[in-house]
Image (tube, rainbow, N blue to C red):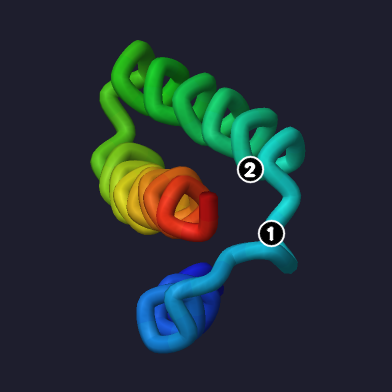
Amino acid sequence: AFLPQLIKTLKTKKADDVSLTTLIMFIIGVLSWIIYGYKIASTPILIANLITLILNLLILISKIYFSKQLK
């Protein structure tokens, strides 16, 4: 679900439509799922949430990077 957002962000070099607060809160939630998946040794939970974490971290990095370029 986050791949289209990442592609749009990289193409337009803008992430103004992404809320920084919401993105950080979501990443914290995904990290919680990763910890849970690790504790119960659930590979599907780990893989799904690691992919989600990577995509969201790339969106976060893009948002920060592109917002600094505008200044």
Dot 1: within a 10 Å radius of its alpha carbon, few (fewer than 14), some, or many (20 or more) residues? some
> From the viewer's perspective, is residue 40 above or below residue 26?
above
Q: Nearer the viewer, residue 36 or 63?
A: 63
Three-letter code, disc 1? Val
Picture coordinates of residue 27, whole percent (x, y): 54, 34
Is 23 left, or right, of 35 in this rendering? right
Picture coordinates of residue 50, whole percent (x, y): 31, 43
What residue lies at 35% left-to-right and 12% top-to-bottom? 39
Whether residue 58 is visible: yes
- Label 2, secondary structure: give it: helix
The answer for how far apart the CA atoms under marks 1 and 2 are is 7 Å
Q: Nearer the viewer, residue 57 or 9?
A: 9
- Label 1, secondary structure: give it: loop
Q: Nearer the viewer, residue 32 or 62?
A: 62
Dot 2: within a 10 Å radius of its alpha carbon, few (fewer than 14), some, or many (20 or more) residues? some
Picture coordinates of residue 19, whole percent (x, y): 74, 50
Picture coordinates of residue 24, whole percent (x, y): 61, 32
What residue lies at 68% left-to-right and 63% top-to-bottom? 16
Is 22 left, or right, of 41 in this rendering? right
What residue lies at 42% left-to-right and 56% top-to-bottom? 69
Label 1 close to label 2 by CB (< 8 Å): yes
Read off the residue under disc 1: 18
Q: Quadrant of residue 17?
A: bottom right
Read off the residue under disc 2: 23
Mark number for residue 60?
A: none
Q: Decide which of tag 1 and tag 2 comes sooner along the chain.
A: 1
> From the viewer's perspective, is residue 17 above or below residue 29?
below
Locate the N terminus and report the quarter of the image it occupies.
bottom right
